[in-house]
Amino acid sequence: MRHAGLILAVLALVAAVTPWSASRADTAKRGLLPAIEPAAKGERCVEDTATMRRNHMRFLEHQRDDTVHGGIRGAKHSLKGCVDCHASKTTGSVAAAKTDFCVACHSFAAVKVDCFGCHATKPAAALATTSGGKP
C-alpha cells in the first residue's frame, strides 16, 4: 500500500511540472521526445504518427515476410519507402547521425536498430550517385 502512495505522489509531481499544452518542438527541446529532422519527401506518411510509432516494426516484419516468401516488393510499408522519405537532408541517411530518423528514435528508446546490417541507410538515388550506380 505504501508503494501506491509513492506512485501517486510521483504522478502528481510529474503532472504539476509537465506543461500538457507544450508543442512537440518544445517537448523535444526539453528531452521528452527525440529530436528528429522532418521527412525530406512526401506530403504525409503512409500511416498517422501515433500508429507508426506504435506499429512500425510490425509493418516492417509483415512486409519482410511478404517480400521473402511471396516476392512482393515496393508495397505500402516497405523499408525502402521509409528510407526514401526519411533520409536526412544533411547526411542523406536514416542512420548516420544522432538526429537521423531511425537513430534518433531508437537511441531515445534504447532500442537497437539492426535493419541496416543488411539494408541500405540511404535512398537508392543517393547510393547511385555516391557509388557509381552500385548499391
Image (cartoon, helix red, strand yellow):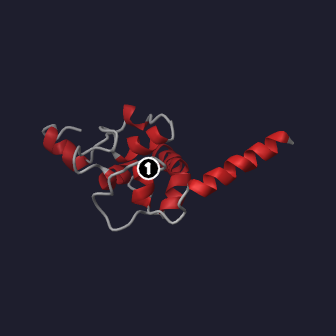
In the rendered image, residue 55, in percent from the top left (x then y), is placed at: 55, 53
Q: Which residue lies furthest to the top in this view?
A: 117
| Element type where label 1 sits in the image | loop
Q: Viewer-proximal residue, 80 or 74? A: 80
Q: In this view, does 51 lie above or below 101?
A: below
- The kind of residue on which mark 1 rests is Arg
- Residue drawn where x is 29% and y is 49% of the image: 87
Q: Left of 135 or right of it: where is 81? A: right
- Residue drawn where x is 41% and y is 57% of the image: 26
Q: Left of 1 or right of it: where is 19? A: left
Q: Viewer-proximal residue, 24 or 10? A: 10
- In the rendered view of the protein, which quadrant contains the N terminus? top right
Which image quadrant for residue 45? bottom left
Q: Left of 12 or right of it: where is 128? A: left
In the rendered image, residue 127, in percent from the top left (x then y), is placed at: 21, 42
Number of callouts: 1
In the rendered image, residue 118, in percent from the top left (x then y), is placed at: 37, 33
- Residue drawn where x is 27% and y is 49% of the image: 88
Which image quadrant for residue 132? top left
Q: Left of 59 or right of it: where is 5? A: right
Q: Viewer-proximal residue, 52 or 132? A: 52
- In the rendered view of the protein, which quadrant contains the C terminus? top left
Return the residue at label 1.
30
Q: How crowded is mark 1: few (under 14 residues within 10 Å), some or many (20 or more)?
A: few
Q: Residue furthest right?
A: 1
In the rendered image, residue 96, in percent from the top left (x then y), is placed at: 30, 37
- Residue drawn where x is 30% and y is 53% of the image: 84
Do we see residue 78 in this rendering? Answer: no
Do we see residue 2 in this rendering? Answer: yes
